[in-house]
Image (spheres, grey):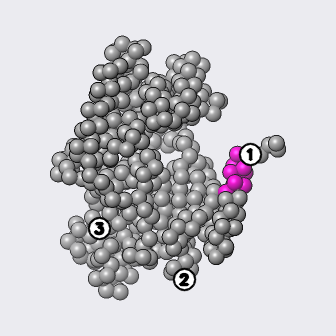
């Protein structure tokens, strides 16, 4: 797939172009005014659409019929994402998680009834090992770039945004599914995100609707968590030395 | 191979980790063990409250008192306030500190439902800079295990934790961002910040 390779190279160039070194705990946010507008939009969308639509889906984290259906749809969507994750593990030179992710996909696609169930986690000790092309870029040494808040999708960086685009293009499922089927998979993942909104409602409310500067809170919390995932955390805070 | 439940095994590994740290850093040896036991004791008390089935408002008060006994509230409140802490009068700071404590009890206490039926195990401790990092793993219903790290120091004269880091998210840093934003909204007025904190969380 030479077209995909060219795309990946372009994406890296894009990142490198707007990259500056972030020193430890700093967040590079040159697009803050634009980001804040997007944040206001996302926050309004959450308050008026996402939150009311997902309310009662599984607020007690419990076992209602709705939450089981949602779980199934989420499993289905996330199963279709496994081949892409296996590819990214490989691109990062991590063979073992790549192989395990491949097995996971095979188990859940068959025994898991096309991915609606997740016997791989439950019975085969093959839990999801999350990754994406944003992480691949990080492993390749591409700098983090600038913080971005994307409409609908939320917090990101220039490196992770490029990664998202590349992930859509290099997804191995394109070889198997036609475009409509592939889009259904993507939709299923969106539904599972809505389910997460309901499950972690208190935490989301606290950050998005109860903090004094929800933009700054979202940016900080997301950034810290993302750097933790990528193993690029800053230095520990020592308040006694300040 | 004897059959050992996963939790026990991990607890045992954590113990071995603590033992290794003990051997490697003899000067800090007691503190590594102490730091872990401080975290363990505070967790035990938190779970006792969660499982007590009291009304939420009562629970928040209990969480607040546990936090006051095991955390270095003074340095956390001071660090959250940032440079403004140096300009505040002792009376202003003390009123702010009290309001901050209540705010923390409510804000984090509100999440107690997520912890019903969960378990947090202490897995190890190591010295970092001038303090100790105690690591633990939280097993919450329907979620993959989360790494929770506690930073413990005796710089206040007593062993207390001053920071909790959950999957990389740093409580001290996020409370500093929050309190700074609240203070800015009040244009730097400490009394205004204090009264907002009494309502927040």
According to the image, label 2 marks what residue? B157
Residue B197 lies, in percent from the top left, at: 34, 69
Q: Which residues are magenta?
A: B5-14
The answer as to whether the residues below labels 3 and 2 share one chain is yes
- Asked if residue B116 lies left or right of residue A164, the reply is right
- Identify which residue is drawn at 68% across, 62% down: B20
Give me the C-alpha separation between circle 3 and circle 1: 46 Å
Residue A55 lies, in percent from the top left, at: 39, 39
| B64, above or below A176, in the image | below
Chain of the residue under the numbered disc 3 shown in the image:
B
- Identify which residue is drawn at 32% across, 52% down: A218
Residue B174 lies, in percent from the top left, at: 37, 61
The answer as to whether the residues below labels 3 and 1 share one chain is yes
In terms of image quadrants, where is residue A5? top left
According to the image, label 3 marks what residue? B180
- Asked if residue B60 lies left or right of residue A151, the reply is right
- Identify which residue is drawn at 49% across, 35% down: A93
According to the image, label 1 marks what residue? B5
Question: Main structural element of the magenta stretch: helix, strand or loop?
Answer: helix
- SS at circle 2: loop
* Residue B41 visible, this orientation: no
Q: Residues within 10 Å of mark 3 (few under 14, many from 20)?
A: many
Residues A45 and B30: in front is B30
- Identify which residue is drawn at 38% across, 35% down: A133
Q: Are marks 3 and 2 in contact (CB under 8 Å)?
A: no
- SS at circle 1: loop
In terms of image quadrants, where is residue A197? top left
| B189, above or below B185, in the image | below
């Amino acid at each position: 797939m030479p077209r995909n390779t060219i795309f990946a190279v372009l994406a890296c160039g894009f990142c490198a172009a707007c990259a500056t070194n972030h020193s430890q705990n700093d967040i590079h946010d040159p697009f803050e005014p634009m980001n804040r507008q997007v944040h206001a939009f996302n926050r309004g969308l959450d308050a008026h659409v996402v939150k009311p639509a997902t309310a009662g889906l599984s607020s007690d984290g419990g076992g209602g019929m709705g939450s089981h259906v949602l779980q199934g749809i989420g499993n289905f969507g996330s199963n279709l994402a496994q081949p892409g994750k296996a590819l990214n593990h490989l691109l990062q030179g991590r063979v073992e998680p790549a192989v395990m992710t491949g097995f996971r996909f095979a188990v859940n696609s068959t025994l898991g009834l096309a991915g609606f169930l997740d016997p791989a986690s439950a019975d085969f000790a093959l839990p999801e090992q999350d990754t994406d092309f944003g992480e691949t870029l990080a492993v390749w040494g591409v700098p983090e770039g600038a913080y971005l808040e994307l409409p609908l999708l939320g917090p990101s960086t220039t490196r992770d945004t490029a990664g998202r685009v590349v992930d859509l293009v290099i997804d191995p499922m394109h070889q198997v599914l036609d475009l409509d089927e592939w889009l259904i998979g993507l939709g299923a993942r969106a539904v599972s995100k809505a389910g997460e909104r309901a499950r972690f409602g208190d935490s989301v409310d606290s950050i998005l609707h109860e903090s004094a500067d929800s933009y700054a809170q979202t940016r900080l919390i997301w950034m810290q968590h993302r750097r933790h995932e990528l193993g690029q955390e800053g230095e520990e805070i020592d308040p006694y030395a300040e | 191979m004897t059959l050992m439940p996963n939790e026990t095994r991990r607890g045992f590994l954590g113990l071995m980790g603590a033992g290794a740290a003990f051997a490697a850093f003899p000067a800090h040896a007691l503190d590594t063990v102490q730091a872990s036991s401080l975290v363990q004791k505070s967790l035990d008390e938190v779970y006792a409250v969660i499982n007590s089935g009291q009304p939420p408002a009562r629970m928040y008060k209990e969480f607040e008192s546990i936090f006051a006994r095991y955390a270095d509230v003074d340095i956390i409140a001071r660090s959250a306030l940032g440079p403004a802490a140096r300009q505040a009068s002792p009376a202003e700071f003390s009123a702010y500190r009290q309001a901050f404590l209540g705010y923390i009890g409510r804000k984090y206490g509100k999440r107690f439902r997520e912890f019903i039926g969960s378990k947090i195990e202490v897995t190890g401790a190591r010295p970092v800079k001038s303090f100790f990092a105690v690591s633990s793993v939280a097993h919450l219903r329907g979620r993959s295990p989360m790494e929770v790290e506690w930073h413990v120091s005796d710089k206040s004269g007593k062993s207390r934790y001053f920071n909790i880091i959950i999957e990389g998210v740093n409580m001290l840093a996020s409370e500093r961002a929050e309190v700074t934003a609240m203070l800015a909204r009040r244009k730097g007025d400490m009394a205004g910040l204090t009264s907002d904190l009494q309502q927040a969380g």
